[in-house]
């Protein structure tokens, strides 16, 4: 059960941390409509994280979903490092979202086939949400890349800066291999070809050059992160840690 717990936490943490980061756009969006859209996408990610953390809590048997979200330390989180990267300007956020959304769509499509009924159900629900997220980020990437010289230059730099975090999408360690062998988890390596096809098509339409696959960041599966996660958790977990007995 510890293997299933850790695998579930990996998926949950990725949604939780990306949702938390995206929520920082609330009241700061470039337009009212976009402010609402980003807030809604953030809420979708929190919803996915909550379902997964509730399941993790059930597997764990001793900690609640809130405990798992607010009372674990940085090294106990397993989210993909790309999700903890700062929002930057709007183009930075849209590039990060597009790369993540493409991965999420493919990942949840495969996870929906899991023999673990709970994970499959969460994946099926998430597919409907992520399909919108992907359409939203894809359209913005094309709009920015094929827009003004300034917007094109900015998003080109955005994708070059964040590309080194995309390698983690397709990593497989012993736990991943075990979950896949037991028909519970996903073979991330098999997602790469389809991810490449989607990303390449959109970048071509957006007139953005794809960075080369060279050095890639890694370590999230072992609880290793960039310095940004610790700062985010300090803010995200402040109230629950300051008032541990409070009822929400």
Image (spheres, rainbow, N blue to C red):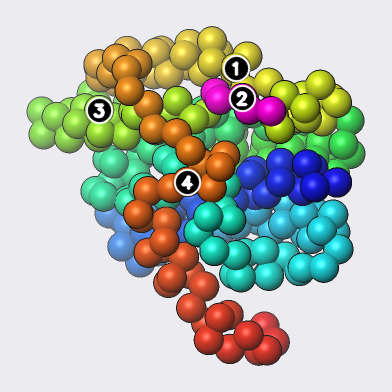
Per the image, label 4 sits on a secondary structure element best described as loop
Residue labelled with disc 3: 160
Q: Earlier in the sequence, mark 3 or mark 2?
A: 3
- Secondary structure mostly seen in magenta is loop
Q: Earlier in the sequence, mark 3 or mark 1?
A: 3
Residue labelled with disc 2: 172
Residue labelled with disc 1: 189
Query: Which residue is pictured at 35% across the width and 54% down the height?
Result: 227
Q: Are marks 2 and 1 in contact (CB under 8 Å)?
A: yes
Q: CA distance from mark 4 to mark 1?
A: 21 Å
Picture quadrant of residue 24: bottom left
Q: CA distance from mark 3 to mark 4?
A: 22 Å
Q: In the image, is residue 172 part of the stretch drawn in magenta? A: yes
Residue labelled with disc 4: 224
Q: Earlier in the sequence, mark 2 or mark 1?
A: 2
Disc 2 packing (10 Å; few <14; some 14–19; many ≥20): some
């Amino acid at each position: 059960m510890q293997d299933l717990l850790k695998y579930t936490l990996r998926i949950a943490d990725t949604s939780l941390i990306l949702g938390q980061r995206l929520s920082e756009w609330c009241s700061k969006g470039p337009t009212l409509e976009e402010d609402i859209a980003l807030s809604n996408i953030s809420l979708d990610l929190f919803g996915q994280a909550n379902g997964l953390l509730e399941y993790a809590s059930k597997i764990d048997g001793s900690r609640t979903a809130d405990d798992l979200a607010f009372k674990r330390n940085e090294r106990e989180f397993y989210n993909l490092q790309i999700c903890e990267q700062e929002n930057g300007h709007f183009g930075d956020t849209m590039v990060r979202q597009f790369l993540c959304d493409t991965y999420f769509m493919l990942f949840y499509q495969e996870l929906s086939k899991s023999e673990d009924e709970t994970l499959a159900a969460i994946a099926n629900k998430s597919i409907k949400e992520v399909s919108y997220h992907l359409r939203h980020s894809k359209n913005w990437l094309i709009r920015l890349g094929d827009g003004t010289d300034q917007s094109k230059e900015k998003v080109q730099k955005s994708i070059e800066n964040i590309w080194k975090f995309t390698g983690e999408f397709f990593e497989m360690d012993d736990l991943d291999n075990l979950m896949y062998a037991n028909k519970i988890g996903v073979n991330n390596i098999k997602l790469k070809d389809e991810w490449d096809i989607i990303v390449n098509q959109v970048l071509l339409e957006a007139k953005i050059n794809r960075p080369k696959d060279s050095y890639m960041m890694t370590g999230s599966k072992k609880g290793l992160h960039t310095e940004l996660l610790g700062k985010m958790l300090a803010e995200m977990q402040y109230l629950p840690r300051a008032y541990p007995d409070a009822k929400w």
